[in-house]
Every structure is written in C-alpha cells, then in structure tokens.
C-alpha cells in the first residue's frame, strides 16, 4: 500500500463506496498482516518507495499465491523472484493480469553458473602459473651429502658400556657372596683361625700329570674363549654400533694420519 492507495481508500469512504467499518478493516492490516507462515509488509512502499518483493524459492505455490494476492489487494505492482511454473499457476488462479518471465530466472541461473566457472578458471590459471614458475627453478648442489659416521639413536656405546659395568659388578658380587658362604678350610691360615693353634706341618700341593693336563686344557680354553669373545665383540661393534671401516677412518682422522 502506497500513498495513492491510502488517498483512494479515504476518497472511497468519503464518496460512500466503502463504509467506515470497511475502511477500518482495510487499515487494520497496516503496516503488517500476519498470514501465519509469513508477515506481509504493506507499509514498505510508504517507507522505501517500493513494495515488498516476494522471494519464491523455498515457499509452496499456495503460500506464494496467498502472499501475492494480499499484496495485490492493497494496490500497486507486486514482484516475485525465484518463482517456478507451479507457483505462477497458483498465483494466476487468484490474481488477474500476472506475468511470468521465465527468461529472467534462466538469466539468474546462467549468471550464477558463469560466476562459478570464472572462479574455477581463475583457480586453474593460478595453479598453472605456479607450476610454470616452479619448472623454471634450478637447484645447484654445493656439497654432496655424506653418510653419517654414527647413528643418532639409540646410543649403543652407552648401552654396551652400561651392560659391561653391570655384568662386571654382578660377577664381583657373585664371587664375594660365594666366598662368604664357603665354609671349607683352605690353607694354613684357615686352619690356624679355626683351631687357634699353629699347625705342626703343612703338606704342599702335589701336581700330578692329570693336574698338568687339566691346567693346559684350561689355558687352551681360555685362549680360545678370549679370541672368540674378541671376534664377537668386533662383530657387535660392526653391525650394531658403527661399521669397522668408519671406525678406522675416524681413528685416522683423530690422530691426523
């Protein structure tokens, strides 16, 4: 409803075409009319100079037709956007002289698709430019990479050293425990401490041929075991700590050879 519609309403009441009650009934819907599912703004033309525009998308044909008819009843042009054929058919049954311009809706859809295509084209163009710039880059190797001389982690040297110290301590502790638990008498000193009297005589150890063979066999086993232990230790260092060639080169560098 605009100013001309209000003047016409007053003029119809003055001439008797409308009763005062009918005029009041029409004015009762100013500025808003609640239809339950929407509030129609009849006063927008007076405030902004343009009546309210119906947004057809998301509304049923019955709702669009009812809003359209209520706005048209108050006079003035009525505009609905994003409307479809079903909504137009429903409006046409209630309001005469309505027009449906399908090209306008197609134009809006085409413009939206065009904007999307332009945005995608811009993104593709930026990607191509970046790829072209990266192709032109060249890298020069100043110094070739060298293999590491020692592993970063775990610290195998510390682990082996800690294991050696713990094993040595465990061996010494076991020997001391066995010595303290041993109650056998060994030598003149133990006899004197046990009997509190000095012994009259001491018989020395008699070494037989069997004892000599056992001694030589024990020495042979000790030598073989030492060599085997050295080989095992070298293998452990080579495979789990550092290769032997790297160790040899490090030693040569350290001593300046």
Image (cartoon, helix red, strand yellow):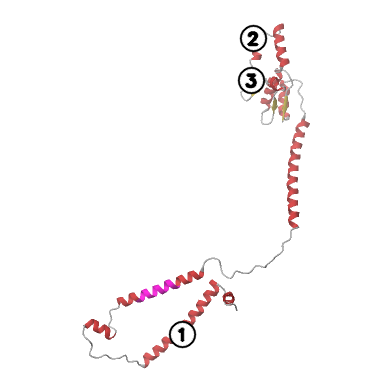
Q: Earlier in the sequence, mark 3 or mark 1?
A: 3
Circle 3 or circle 1, nearest the eye: 1
Q: Quadrant of residue 194?
A: bottom left
Where residue 205 sits: x, y (%)? Answer: 32, 90
- What number of labels is visible? 3
Circle 3 SS class? strand
Label 3 environment density (alpha carbons within 10 Å; few <14, some 14–19, many ≥20): some
Specify the quadrant that holds the C terminus. bottom right
- Asked whether 236 or 107 is in front, the reply is 236
Specify the quadrant that holds the N terminus. top right
Where residue 66 sits: x, y (%)? Answer: 67, 22
182 left or right of 237 in image: left
Which residues are drawn in magenta?
164-175
- Main SS category, magenta section: helix
The residue singled out by tag 3 in the image is 33
The residue singled out by tag 1 in the image is 223
Q: Between marks 2 and 1, how big is the CA–CA gap?
A: 130 Å
Q: Is residue 1 magenta?
A: no
Q: Is residue 132 above or below residue 180?
A: above
Circle 2 SS class? helix
Q: Residue furthest bottom?
A: 209
Q: Earlier in the sequence, mark 2 or mark 1?
A: 2
Residue 69 seen from this side: no
The residue singled out by tag 2 in the image is 21
For image coordinates 47% across by 72% down, the residue present is 161
167 left or right of 184 in image: right
Q: Is residue 17 above or below residue 182?
A: above
Label 2 environment density (alpha carbons within 10 Å; few <14, some 14–19, many ≥20): few
37 left or right of 169 in image: right
């Amino acid at each position: 409803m605009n100013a001309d519609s209000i003047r016409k309403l007053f003029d119809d009441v003055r001439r008797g075409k409308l009763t005062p009650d009918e005029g009041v009934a029409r004015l009762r819907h100013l500025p808003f009319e609640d239809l339950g599912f929407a509030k129609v703004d009849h006063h927008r033309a007076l405030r902004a100079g343009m009546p309210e525009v119906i947004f057809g998308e998301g509304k049923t044909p019955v709702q669009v037709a009812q809003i359209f008819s209520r706005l048209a009843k108050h006079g003035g042009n009525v505009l609905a956007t994003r409307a479809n054929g079903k909504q137009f058919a429903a409006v046409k049954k209630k309001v005469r002289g309505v027009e449906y311009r399908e090209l306008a809706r197609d134009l809006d859809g085409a413009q939206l698709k065009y904007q999307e295509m332009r945005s995608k084209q811009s993104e593709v163009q930026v990607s191509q430019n970046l790829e072209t710039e990266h192709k032109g880059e060249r890298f020069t190797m100043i110094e070739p990479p060298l293999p590491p001389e020692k592993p970063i982690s775990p610290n195998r040297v510390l682990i082996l050293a800690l294991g050696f110290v713990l094993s040595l301590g465990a061996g010494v502790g076991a020997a001391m425990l066995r010595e303290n638990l041993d109650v056998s008498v060994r030598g003149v000193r133990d006899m004197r401490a046990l009997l509190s009297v000095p012994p009259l005589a001491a018989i020395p150890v008699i070494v037989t041929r069997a004892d000599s063979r056992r001694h030589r066999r024990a020495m042979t086993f000790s030598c073989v075991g030492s060599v085997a232990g050295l080989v095992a230790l070298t293998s452990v260092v080579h495979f789990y700590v550092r290769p032997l060639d790297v160790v040899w080169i490090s030693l040569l560098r350290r001593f300046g050879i």
